Structure formats: C-alpha cells, structure tokens
Amino acid sequence: MNANVLMAACETLGWKYSLQNNILLVTEVGNDSNFNGEFALRLDVSTNEVTYNTYYMPNAHVKVEELKEKFQELNAEYSKNALISEFEKNGFTYRSNYTFTPTEEERFSFYMEAKSYDPLEDEPFASIKFTILKDGTIITDSDYLPNDVNEKAHEAMDILEQHLGNKRVMTKKPVPAKYLSKMKPRRTINLNQNS
C-alpha cells in the first residue's frame, strides 16, 4: 500500500493518524471515537498487515472496509497521475482514449505515445494503452515498441513500481515474425569485464 494514498484516505474520511517507521496508526475514526490512547487501526505499510481494535470499536471491520474503499478510489487516481507524470518525464505524450467509458472495475483508460529517434527505425511512432482498475492496478497493452522507446517505458515503470509500492507483472504477447529481427535484449550486462 502506498503510505501517501493511505494518509489521503484518512484525511478524506476525517480520521486522525500518524505515520512512523512504515506503521500508520489511526487514532480517531470520527467525532465520537474514544480509544483511551490506543489505536483504532494499525497498518503496516511494508507488509499490508492491518490490525484493528475490536475492544473499543466492535464495528472495526466496517471501518477497515471504509478505509479500503476510500484508499482504492484515491489509489486509482494516484496511479493515473503518477503514471502520466513518469512517462512524460521520459519523453512520452498523453493521449485520451475517447472511446472509453468507465465501469465499476475499470476507472481510467488512456494512451502514452512516443517517437523513436533511432535513424534505422522504420516504425518510429509507438503507443501504449493503459487501463487503471478501481484498486489502482495498471494494465498495459501495446504492440511493437522501438527499442529506445521500450527502454524509456521500462525506466518509467521501474520508478512507478517504487512509487506505487507494488510489483509489476508482465505478460508478454507473442512477437510477430516481422519484428523478431528488430528486438534487442533489455539492459544487457557483460559479466566478463576485466578490471
């Protein structure tokens, strides 16, 4: 879970919290809450573990769901804004998906586009379609990307992975035969370097 989004969710709900050492402690969940100095909810941001106080808050599971819903709503928006920002820093341009209609599951859809500056590239323009789900999950879809554009996309996604706090899962599509000769391995490292 992203700590910034969790804090924004608490603020939106009007809850009081503190964050120390990747632990978010919620100490008030509304005007009538009194936990006698104890926490209402304890969220370990690094492990996503949630502990709640059922002694002072018998409906704690309801409050956890309330926070989860607000977190997911804000996380989808955060994922969209962070993605656009990182890709623009890497030379991509935003393009709206005018045919997209949001659903309960899919909140946003758009394209990030870039041009290859490889003089040998005969298909220099590239487009990546992004769909953001209600929980902030990012789904990408693209066809052939020139190597330099592909590298810039990976750099942006590497940074997003750190910002969003979740691992990226890539599912590769079969590569059409006409592109096989154009493909280069990503970030090759020579292990036989002599010092």
Image (cartoon, rainbow, N blue to C red):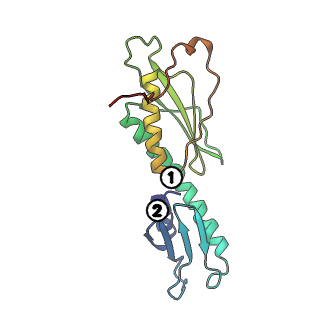
How far apart marks 2 and 1 lie (CA) works out to 16 Å
Q: Amino acid at mark 2?
A: Ala
Is 86 in front, or is 161?
A: 161
* Residue shown at the point (56%, 55%) measured from the top left: 73
Asked if residue 66 is positioned above or below residue 184 in the image, the reply reads below
Q: Residue at x 32, y 31 (%)?
A: 195
Quarter of the image holding residue 66?
A: bottom right
Q: Nearer the viewer, residue 128 or 105?
A: 128
Residue at 60% x, 60% y: name it.
69
What residue did someone put label 2 on? 8
Q: Can you tell which of label 2 and label 1 is closer to the viewer?
A: 1
Q: How many marks?
A: 2
Whether residue 94 can be seen here: no
Local SS, label 2: helix
In the displayed structure, 57 sits above or below 91; it is below
Q: Which mark is residue 35?
A: none
Asked if residue 182 shows in the view, the reply is yes
Q: Is residue 174 left or right of residue 6?
A: right
User: Mark 2 vs mark 1: which is more N-terminal?
Assistant: 2
Left or right of residue 119, residue 134 in this image: right
Furthest toward the bottom, the residue is: 36
Residue 119 lies, in percent from the top left, at: 37, 12
Question: Residue 126, how many percent across, how many down?
Answer: 48, 23
In the image, what residue occupies the spot 67% across and 72% down? 61
Q: Nearer the viewer, residue 108 or 113?
A: 113
The answer to whether the residues at label 2 and label 1 have Cβ atoms under 8 Å apart is: no
Give the left or right position of residue 57, taking residue 16 as reference. Answer: right
Q: Which residue is mark 1?
A: 165
Type of the residue with mark 1: Gly
Return the x and y of residue 185 as percentages of the image width and height.
Answer: 50, 24
